[in-house]
Amino acid sequence: MLDLHVHLLGHEDREANRQNIRAFLEEASRKGLKEIGFADHDYYWEQMNFPLIREAAVEYPNLKVRIGLEADYRLMEEERIQNLLSQFPFDFVIGSVHEIAGWAFDFPEEEPRHHQQEADKLYRDYFNLVTKAAQSGLFTTIGHFDLIKIFGVRPTTDILTLADEALTAVAEKGLVLEINTNGRYKPVREFYPEKRLLEEIKRRGISVTLGSDAHSAEVVGRDIDEAIMLLRQIGVQEVIGFRGFEKLRYTLA
């Protein structure tokens, strides 16, 4: 099917050269993907090589190769992100929240701090930022919607209540939410977002896409088939790809 969240540069542990690009495209082809989307973190901007990805893609005529960006949303940084987006004709842009008031909360060493927090406030602060990201008009996609659960801390308030404003903003802006399979390999051991949120996303008519969040070539497409099965179970009939910010619809047969 498709995987629209892969990181060519990983955590800046490899170069954006033709050999590494091919490794990702070979794995995507081997797994029968129709579309793959590179979306490196915006803070690695200087190491990116978008034209080379376009060149390498020519070697894989049966694979739609898209170029995106995963931009970290922080308050008062909309202009910085807009400046980056103006420098290349991207196909899609993932808006993600990885920080709360300067705290990069998803690093493994930050797990103890999660357990020391008041869970409901933690979730409210997180979803407040997701809401602002959705309202910013900068993104096509919101990444790993409930990332804040990464270490298994759960709120006492209903998750649908906590996420309501963010979901409303996503719907009003016509954004796409990704099913990110990487959550299964984090302490929480489940996809982002959780099934209950996915059911609400479906009920609201919000479109979804698929992403492995692969930081190395061998992870491309990981668990995408299982994510598709989950979507079918809850009645979702299509997923979204992109070309030049235009939504492409793929039917789930």
Image (cartoon, rainbow, N blue to C red):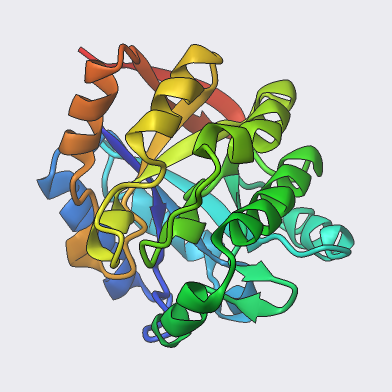
Q: Residue 156: image x %, image y %? A: 50, 48
Q: Residue 83: image x %, image y %? A: 83, 61
Q: Is residue 23 visible?
A: no
203 vs 20: above or below: above
Rendered residue at 38%/76% (across/down) = 17
Rendered residue at 37%/40% (across/down) = 194
Q: Residue 41: image x %, image y %? A: 55, 68
So how many labels did they put on this image? 0
Rendered residue at 47%/64% (across/down) = 52
Relative side of 7 to 43, left or right: left
> What is the quadrant of the C terminus in the image?
top left
Relative side of 113 to 211, left or right: right
State which quadrant residue 88 falls in: bottom right
State which quadrant residue 228 falls in: top left
Kindly give the residue lying farthest to the front in the view shown.
156
Q: Nearer the viewer, residue 198 or 236?
A: 198
Q: Nearer the viewer, residue 35 or 106?
A: 106
Relative side of 126 to 191, left or right: right
Q: Nearer the viewer, residue 128 or 133?
A: 128
Q: Is residue 70 visible?
A: yes
State which quadrant residue 196 falls in: top left
Q: Nearer the viewer, residue 126 or 113?
A: 113
Relative side of 8 to 205, left or right: left
Rendered residue at 27%/73% (across/down) = 19
> What is the quadrant of the N terminus in the image?
top left
